[in-house]
Amino acid sequence: MTQRDSQSDASAAKPASRTIRLTVAQALVRYLGALRTEAGEPLFGGIFAIFGHGNVAGIGEALYQNRETLPTYRAHNEQAMAHSAIAYAKAHMRKRMMAVTTSIGPGATNLVTAAALAHVNRLPVLLLPGDIFVSRAPDPVLQQVEDFQDGGVSANDTLKPVSRYFDRIVHPAQLLTALPRAIRVLTDAAMCGPVTLALPQDVQAMAFDYPAWFFEPRVVEFHAPAAVPREITRAAELLRASEKPLIVSGGGVLYSGATDVLRTFAERHGIPVVETQAGKSAIAWNHPLQLGGVGVTGASSANAAAEEADYIVGVGTRLQDFTTGSNSLFQQTRLISINANPFDAIKQNGVAVEADARAALEALSAELGEWRAPLPWTENARRRAQEWRDIVARVTNTPLDGALPREADVIGAVQRSNDRSSCDDIVVCAAGTLPADLEKFWRTSTPGGYHMEYGYSCMGYEIAGGLGVKLARPEREVIVMVGDGSYLMMNSELATSVMLGAKLIVVLLDNRGYACINRLQQACGGAPFNNLLDDCWQAPEGAPDIDFAMHAKSMGALAEHVSGLDELGAAMQRARAADRSYLISIDTDPARPTNEGGCWWEVAVPEVSEREAVCSARSAYEDALAARANSFKGELA
């Protein structure tokens, strides 16, 4: 277990020939700890670990030896700690990241959901699950999943389809190639996503004479493709012919550090900007050319512009169905798609500009020169933007007159509790009705002030994600907005936040069930069933009346339940002044959605049913399908 130089002092004068004898686990941890960003910070902000028999002896010992250079954080759930690590990377705009280690078996398979989330959202995280014995001498070991056709398969193989790069380290020398490959994927704009290095527990403990140069401090260079001149020229030619151009700002704008460049581009060329969930906060909420979110959870101003636009410039967006209205919103437009990832750049028959967002926008602006969009289009966009800001102010300040608040009401009260004009809170959310209303009504002036996981829309991400954001941005107030359904799915990292001194403000909206899906169920003609607690099968005693404030207090947080928006505002002030995580619960209306904004979203309705409501919903669904098909035919014509 000890580290030693294998050469004499005389040979030590020749750095190229020196070796250091380390276990695989020690070598891996030492390598990660030596990596630096161009700003001089450690590339890895730490490693989340839940130890078991598959990693406590190997990686556990290595992390203890290197605890000063690579901090280790204990968590309470493997999926949740991976969410925290992913959120940390997102909050750092993919320029810093974290690793996660688990034991074999359930610890490893608990990572699958988080890995899928990172894969969908193009976010870096290094997963280091323990694995079975390569020697197979003690097979089957505790928690081993045996494959009756392939002796080389373990539970970790479930991570292969949700990893951008996967390797199983079966010999110590493999680290010399596997680790550089892993880091390249994690820091490449096109390939970025989760990396899994499965670590058999006997191999973790094996020693090897590694070359000393492998552990020398090094600066990691992030890679993004440069703009190709011919692609820029073609995009510029198309834009010059445009009468009604529109920019769709995606997450790639934030990750490439292109926020200022995008704003300058829009202003110079008079092109309005709409946002995706991942791209929100790239331009301040009150910028005159900022039309708000686009698509199913978008603003009416943005969707009206999208329907009229003749050219869409997609920047760093993967064109998810919520952005495109299930491919119905942009049917009358041509798409110019700027994306570092070629898979995303060619979607929707787009004219691809395969490049980093910042580099492409700078090159495209230079190519366009003094060209500007027609003034009537730009002025109309400014008018629409102001109209939407007026709607936001009205919706988030509407008197309740005794009714239970909606999500938009709570959002308004939370934002009014910030007396700073910079709107510098970071809001964190993931699933349910809140993402729709937050994209429409949350106001932020700073890039990264809106942290939404909506690529995978993973319930349970919220509190774990908030912890990762707070570790990345300790100077900012991190506000987690979460429904009771998501909170009950995964809340244990609230205790971790208290333990680490990473203060969160959790605003819990209690509508007693899955209200978002309940409304979708009825919109598709279904009867209220198995979503709200009142519509679920229950024993005679009924569903429990959960005291969320008491639950949060039991994990060490401060907490209270409030009965209205005035009380919520006062509670937010107490939470902002608190020295630890603070949960505020408030009852909300499960039946009253916010009707402003939005567009069609395709959800298949049963073709045959005995219920008239379902048949009626099916008829409306077929009409919408026909409208999309006719729009597509019109585009081809």
Image: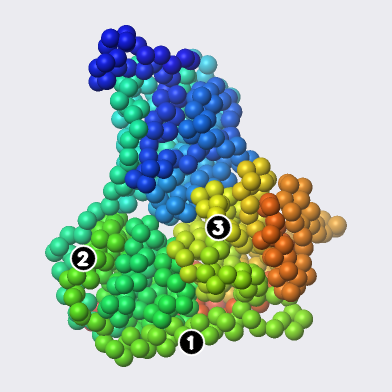
Residue where numbered disc 1 is placed: 387
Residue farthest along the bottom direction in this orientation: 376
Q: Nearer the viewer, residue 108 or 33?
A: 33
| Residue 236 location, quadrant | bottom left
The image shows residue 381 at horizontal and vertical percentages of 38, 85
The image's mark for residue 422 is none
Q: Earlier in the sequence, mark 2 or mark 3?
A: 2
Q: Secondary structure under badge 2? A: helix
The image shows residue 424 at horizontal and vertical percentages of 53, 65
CA gap between label 1 and label 3 equals 30 Å
Q: Is residue 224 left or right of residue 551?
A: left
CA gap between label 2 and label 3 equals 34 Å
Q: Is residue 384 left or right of residue 338?
A: right
Residue where numbered disc 3 is placed: 476
The image's mark for residue 363 is 2
Q: Are marks 2 and 3 in contact (CB under 8 Å)?
A: no
Q: Is residue 374 left or right of residue 34?
A: left
Q: Nearer the viewer, residue 14 or 621?
A: 14
| Residue 608 location, quadrant | bottom right
Q: Secondary structure under badge 1? A: helix
Answer few, some or many: residues within 10 Å of disc 2's Cα (few below 14, many 20 plus, some between 14 and 19).
some
> Residue sitting at 74 percent across and 54 percent down?
558
Q: Are marks 2 and 1 in contact (CB under 8 Å)?
A: no
